[in-house]
Image (tube, coloured by chain):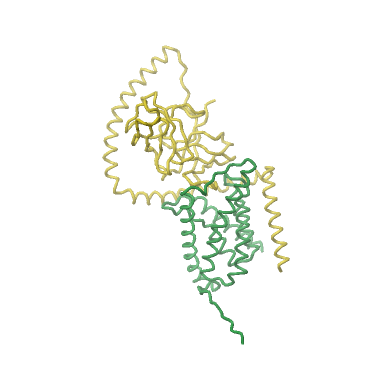
Amino acid sequence: MYGKIIINSLLTLCLIIFELSFVSALPGGLNNISLILVVLVFVIGMTSLNTSLSWAILVGFILDIFSFSMFGVHLVSLFLVVLIINLLLTNFFTNRSLYTFLVLTFFATILYEFFSNFLIYLFSLFGGKYLPVFITKDFWQGELIQLFLNLLIVLIIFYSLGFIMPKLKPVFLNKKINVKK
Amino acid sequence: MIKNNNRKIIIFIAVIMLLIFLHLTRILLPVENFIFNIFNPVLKTFYSTGSSFRDNYNEKIDKKDLLEISNKLQEDNSRIIAENSRLKAIEVENGSLRKYLNFFEKEDQSFILANIISRKGLDIFSLGESVVINRGSLDGLKRGLVVVNSNGIIIGKILSTKESLSEICLVIDNDCRLAIAVQGKEDTLGIAEGELGLTIKIDFIPQTADMTEGDIVITSGLEDNIPRGMVLGKVESVNSESNKLWQSATVDSLASFDNLTMVSVLLPSE
């Protein structure tokens, strides 16, 4: 059990370091990739709710330490995203196909931006800093690029993992039509 | 099972609230500082690696313009050499005059070196160009201090600080504003502001002010903690219309932002 905790913690820290410093320095729009969200979606899909929430809290906590926004924004946003994505996975997308991960990543990206901006706005009502980023063209451009890149990364990771793990066999969603006799 | 899940979620919510509470009451500060100290060297290394990718990428993109830039630089170099020898003569004369009038020697500006550990920052509003360095309020840094590269060219200003981190807006960022003057034309003043993460625009230049392409733009010294004479860039174009109250200009920064890994923060003189 302790081995599992140590491994998960180390993987989380590697992810944070990679995202914070390496990804942010990349050129050509690649710095918009949100590797944290993509990896979290896979963690939700491949492990338990406990593990996913632990990842979200550890990642969110360290991001908040390095962030200049209100403390807790990343923590709460990632926590809520994991809860909602898990809900979608267990109730709507019951298989682990490529489409499932793509759709979940799509929702994760949108929800994370929504929650983090909403929390900042709430904080601004008590005197915090707030900029209405939604009115800027740069914001939407950045969001679209992020969405596209995240989905591309999911595709790459999914097929890479498909070779290693039988859990992620690339199957398509099947619609079963039940015929009542 | 649902009850079990709900209980787990409540526990996680309690953990989150506890973390936020401990942060706000600064009980977690030693832990946060420990994490900064552990992460900083690693972040610095990874950022350098990412930065070199960025460098190579930009090099490939810019290769076709390099010859043109090289020729232009050679011309500029010759002109600067001539200007430099004239300035050296003025410096010697200035030194003698100061001695005669018994002026105190101006102290060298104190500064602190810092490594860049992340680009674009982690602020939710980091739309523009900003970087994070591994120095903060514990090192004497505060909002508004100017940041320069190894050649002494201004690259940005400190936006906000934590104990061991600071966020810097680059001069090409919309949030970065500097009070500037034109070198050699003491009456020409304005406000320089980043534009689109690519260039710098100067607004509120009086119509009567004299500004031409190629002029060197420096800090005017009107802002607290920013000394006069720090080089920002060179005027690329001037937009002057007689029916407007102000004229504006576009400035090309003399600093390169793509391969920045280390910067200096000018500390306020006591």
* Residue toward you, B168 or A132: A132
* Residue at 33% across, 48% down: B62
In the image, farthest residue toward the top: B100
B135, above or below A81, in the image: above
Q: Determine the residue located farthest toward the front in the rendered image.
A: B243
Considering every residue shown, the one lying at the far bottom of the view is A181
Is B67 above or below relative to B109?
Answer: below
Q: Indicate the quadrant containing the N terminus of chain B: top left, top right, bottom left or bottom right.
A: bottom right
In the rendered structure, the answer to whether residue B209 lies left or right of residue A56 reads: left
Residue B145, given in percent of the width and then of the height, sits at: 51, 33
Task: Give the position of the C terminus of chain B as an image quadrant.
Answer: top right
Is residue B46 visible to us here?
A: no
Q: The yellow chain is which one?
A: B
Report the label total: 0
Name which quarter of the figure residue B187 lies in. Answer: top left
Horizontal side of residue A34 vs B246, given as left or right: right
Judging depth in this view, the residue of B89 and B19 nearest the camera is B19
Q: Where is residue A130 in the image (x, y as percent from the top left)?
A: 57, 43
Q: Where is residue A44 in the image (x, y as percent from the top left)?
A: 59, 64
Query: What is chain A's hue in the picture?
Result: green
Q: In this view, does A35 lie above or below B248?
A: below
Q: Which residue is drawn at 60% across and 56% down?
A: A78
Can residue B67 be seen in this snapshot? Answer: yes
Q: Which residue is drawn at 34% across and 24% down?
A: B87
Q: Where is residue A7 in the image (x, y as percent from the top left)?
A: 60, 60
User: Which residue appears at 37% of the width and 38% of the height?
Assistant: B252
